[in-house]
Image: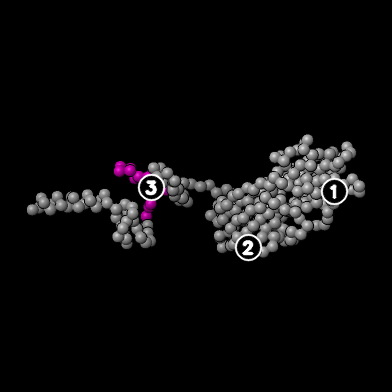
Amino acid sequence: MKLFLYILTIISTTTFVHSQVGINTENPTRILDINGDLNLRKELRVGGTDIVAGEAGTKDQLLQIKADADTKNNWKTYQIANGTGSLSLYYLNTTKDDTGILFNTTGSTAAYNMDDNATDWIYLTKNKDNFVVTDGTGSSKVTLSLQTTVQINRASGSASYSASFACGIFLKKGTEEYKLKAVRSDVVRGLRGSYKIFNLNVTLDKLEQGSYQVQAACRNRQLGSGSTLVNLGIGQPTDTTKLNQAMASSTMTTTLLHPY
């Protein structure tokens, strides 16, 4: 009788080990299926075998879950760049505008102020992006980088001339109006067809939770003088013998960082 009971115990134990076990669920879908909270008092080890204990990780490491089911998950050390204030990359995107803007009249040379509206500015229509701030501590930052090409031209004449312009980055939250958040003015000087690369970079902090839209825009300032007005192309060529559209296109990169 004792031998019979021992055999039943072995069979029962073997069946238990190789079946799925559920805690707080009658229909487990994994070897161990827990329906509820897990309070782990000591180590969590991964990647172990029948004879070797898995890795428990070290301080500040993160558990990396592999997409391939046949590849073991593991602990990973992520290096956060110094100076970011313990922020991690949350969103990154680059937009490209291959249309550009053409100016052929002189505009205003007045100064610009933070939170100005977009009146008299012309958008680089495809340099537009959307991002969402989910952190509610006000610690998030967004870095915006615009690069474009600016070229001058005139129908006739070989003299050297100049044209000034400004480009800015506008931001709005939800249904609010676009507000100017960064601006730089510059000048192109030289002979017909002269051009330069223009860069504008800004980091905005203390962003509140919500959905945001960002867009780049430019405007004309002084285009030559008197009767010698010139054509100014921003993000588009005005003299295709020296610059084509692929070279002149504008890009804007949006990088959103959230607390780590």
**Upstream in sequence: badge 2 or badge 1:** 2
- Asked if disc 3 and disc 2 are in contact, CB closer than 8 Å, the reply is no
Q: Nearer the viewer, residue 98 or 211?
A: 98
* Circle 2: residue type: Gly
Q: Which residues are magenta?
A: 42-57
Residue lying furthest right: 226
Q: Secondary structure at mark 2?
A: loop
Answer whether residue 198 is visible to the viewer in this image. Answer: no
| Amino acid found under the numbered disc labelled 1 | Leu
Q: Which residue is mark 1?
A: 223
Q: What separation in Å lies between label 3 and label 2 (alpha carbons)?
A: 44 Å
Q: Which residue is mark 3?
A: 46
Residue at mark 2 to residue at mark 1: CA–CA distance: 36 Å
**What label does residue 174 carry, if any?**
2
| Pointer 1 local density, CA inside 10 Å: few below 14, some 14–19, many at least 20 | many
Residue drawn at the location 33% of the way across and 54% of the way down: 29
